Amino acid sequence: MKKDILFNTAATFTNSLKAQEKLEADIPHCRVEFSVSFLTFAKQTGVFPDISISFDQINPDFSDSKVLFTADVKTLNMNHPERNDHLQSENFFNSTKYPFIKFENKSFDKVDINRFLMIGDLTIKGVTLSSAFNVTWAGETTDPITKEHLYIFNLNGTFKRLDFGVGTDFPELAIGNDINLDASIVLKKLN
């Protein structure tokens, strides 16, 4: 039964968007979170509230879509003012010199009916490395207030902070090397 629902959702999506659509993030409804282990066992989380996303849909099933993501490092929030300030420093993101995290995909390949593998260039602190993210098409709906048609995706992936020169003075036992990224992305047609 679940398989039928996914198929019907995908069929609805294919019929509602045509190829070559340009979409943008509906920012108030997007959430980009990250987490990292602390002292091996504890998990610390934060968000990037100031982001921008452009999404150029090439094919009706999303394959080969083009994505450009930017996060303002100065707005990252771990719900702890001192930690937020420390993350802005040269010890971590050096947000004065490198104010943005950027991602531009090179591929957006369909894995199955509603899942994709997105690979592209992730730039943090002036270092650009190839990174992969899992993307799930969650569905589409119409906002009952704005009447805008919305397209919802969930994204997750992991990258290594030390590869980007983030927090190099802190051993992995203190702060984990793996940064886990989870995002809920709501897109709307570009006006």
Image: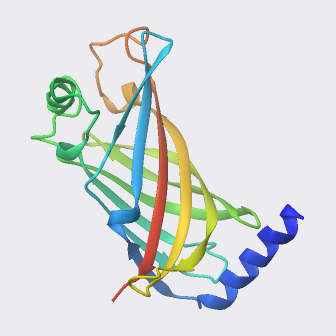
**Residue 5 horizontal/vertical position (percent):** 80, 70
Left or right for 130, reference 92 = right
Asked which colour scheme the image uses, the reply is rainbow
Q: Quadrant of residue 129?
A: top left
Q: Residue furthest right?
A: 1
Residue 189, compared with residue 49, is above or below; it is: below
* Residue found 30% across the figure and 28% down from its top: 165
Relative depth, front residue between 25 and 89: 25
What quarter of the picture does the C terminus occupy?
Answer: bottom left
Q: Is residue 23 above or below residue 33?
A: below
In the rendered view, tell whether residue 49 sits above or below residue 86. below
Where residue 78 appears, as percent x and y from the top left, is: 29, 33
- Residue 37: which quarter of the image? top left
Quadrant position of residue 1: bottom right
Q: Position of residue 9 (x, y in %)?
A: 73, 75
In the picture as drawn, the residue positioned furthest to the front comes out as: 145
**Residue located at (26% from left, 13% from top):** 169
Please name the residue shown 73% across and 76% down the image.
10
Count numbered badges in the picture.
0
